[in-house]
Image (spheres, rainbow, N blue to C red):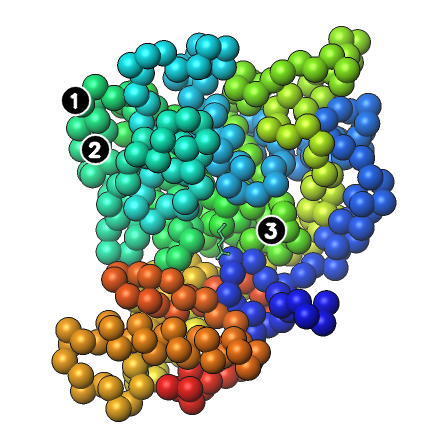
């Protein structure tokens, strides 16, 4: 612990997760103590019942009343499972025989989507080029007119579009793609619609912010990571499907030494997972939900959005800081220019801001006062503050700006 990064510290604003939930940690300990694997009800009766109940609850929030799903080791694996399911629906022969000669499936995701989507294409043997990158608008949302244009272009080129991923909460800018509009395009062209809600899925717990995922009920699948905004220890990632059966269609191997004929398949989750051995990841979320309830999670999510909004206000009050992308999610992307560089020509500014961002960030990390990440956005390195820990106070936020000014 001494040499580890203190990710539960209020001044750790570096990743899409932060804080540590005591109730969930107890759940995690008990999962380790019970030491079982989630492939069968026989081996993990309590874990199975808990997981099925939680998946049902998450599916209801998304708008999948008949849905099913499974927990996975992270958002990337959940996204991969969605691509495998979509590929199986579009090419039903693929599980048994692979793709046929001449078949050229293509998938679509925004230019600011997570890299796990094109990587899923790679894992599926489609190659990285099979993921077509759709341009985004000025705040980072997928441009739906461009999506439609690119689908038609790919069809004319003899390829078969089969999948589109909308992102709810992009990794850097925290943008929410317009799911309802993307769903209309997906339906018109017969594409599987997946929502990568790894980060922003938790907005569904908030009456105030659930509108950011309007249309989620129209998707075929969704990834949701309680280990991000809900504060559950890593990893907690739900793979959710609107209709039952797709995961088994893509993944089931019917190993008879696990899935005996005399057991009820509905309660054996093994064949809807990519894993064989699988931890009881549901238990920590279950414990946390018992303690906090819907209202506790709603307050947490609202509080993180409010914290980011507060930080935007504080930024606006200080010379030298500028917001890059103006939006309402828990990410705040901004740059800073020290006073002696503020008269530089406008064309020079992004390069100078980039230099300042990287050097200041590295100084803060080295001294251990704050850990705040940076990423390239709109052509230059940009600070990315993530409001991820409810115990980060307004004073912490102001202290971060003070520290950046002092280093600058
Ligand atoms: N799975 C994306 C997480 C990246 C981040 O925490 O910054």
| Lower sequence index among marks 3 and 1 | 1
Question: Which residue is tagged 2?
Answer: 150
Query: Where's residue 131, x and y in %?
Result: 32, 34
Going 48% across and 64% down the picture, which residue do you hit?
386
**Label 2 SS:** helix
**Label 3 SS:** loop
Q: From this view, report whether residue 2 is shown above or below residue 107.
A: below
Q: What residue occupies the far right of the structure in this picture?
A: 33
Q: Nearer the viewer, mark 3 or mark 1?
A: 1
**Label 1 SS:** helix
Q: Which mark is residue 306?
A: none
Q: Which mark is residue 156?
A: 1
Query: Where's residue 258, x and y in %?
Result: 76, 18
| Lower sequence index among marks 3 and 2 | 2
Instruction: Measure the C-alpha gap from mark 1 to mark 2.
Output: 10 Å
Question: Which residue is tagged 3?
Answer: 227
Mark 3 and 2 residues: CB-CB less than 8 Å, in contact? Answer: no
> How many residues crowd mark 3 within 10 Å: few (<14), some (14–19), many (20+)?
many
């Amino acid at each position: 612990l001494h040499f580890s990064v203190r990710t539960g510290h209020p001044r750790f604003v570096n990743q899409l997760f932060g804080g540590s939930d005591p109730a969930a940690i107890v759940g995690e300990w008990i999962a380790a103590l019970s030491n079982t694997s989630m492939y069968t009800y026989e081996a993990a009766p309590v874990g199975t019942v808990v997981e099925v109940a939680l998946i049902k609850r998450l599916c209801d929030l998304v708008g999948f009343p008949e849905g099913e799903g499974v927990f996975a080791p992270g958002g990337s694996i959940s996204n991969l499972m969605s691509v495998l399911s979509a590929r199986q629906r579009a090419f039903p022969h693929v599980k048994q025989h692979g793709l046929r000669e001449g078949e050229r499936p293509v998938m679509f995701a925004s230019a600011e989507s997570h890299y796990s989507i094109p990587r899923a294409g790679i894992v599926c043997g489609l190659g990285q080029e099979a993921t077509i990158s759709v341009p985004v608008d000025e705040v980072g949302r997928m441009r739906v007119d461009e999506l439609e244009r690119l689908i038609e272009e790919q069809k004319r080129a003899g390829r078969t579009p089969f999948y589109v991923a909308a992102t709810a909460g992009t990794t850097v800018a925290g943008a929410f793609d317009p799911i309802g509009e993307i769903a209309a395009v997906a339906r018109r062209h017969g594409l599987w619609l997946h929502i990568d809600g790894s980060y922003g899925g938790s907005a569904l717990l908030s009456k105030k912010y659930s509108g950011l995922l309007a249309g989620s009920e129209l998707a075929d699948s969704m990834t949701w990571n309680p280990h991000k905004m809900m504060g559950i220890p890593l990893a907690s990632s739900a793979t959710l499907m609107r209709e039952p059966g797709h995961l088994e269609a893509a993944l089931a191997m019917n190993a008879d030494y696990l899935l005996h004929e005399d057991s009820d398949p509905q309660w054996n989750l093994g064949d809807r997972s990519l894993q064989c051995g699988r931890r009881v990841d549901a238990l920590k979320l279950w414990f946390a939900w018992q303690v906090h309830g819907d209202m506790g999670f709603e307050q947490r999510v609202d509080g993180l959005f409010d914290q980011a909004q507060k930080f935007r206000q504080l930024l606006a009050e200080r010379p030298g800081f500028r917001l890059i992308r103006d939006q309402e999610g828990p990410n705040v992307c901004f740059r800073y220019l020290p006073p002696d560089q503020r008269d530089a020509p406008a064309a020079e500014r992004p390069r100078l801001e980039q230099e300042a961002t990287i050097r200041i960030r590295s100084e803060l990390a080295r001294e251990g006062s704050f850990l705040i990440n940076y990423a390239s956005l709109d052509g230059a390195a940009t600070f990315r503050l993530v409001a991820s820990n409810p115990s980060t106070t307004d004073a912490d936020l102001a202290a971060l700006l003070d520290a950046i000014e002092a280093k600058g």
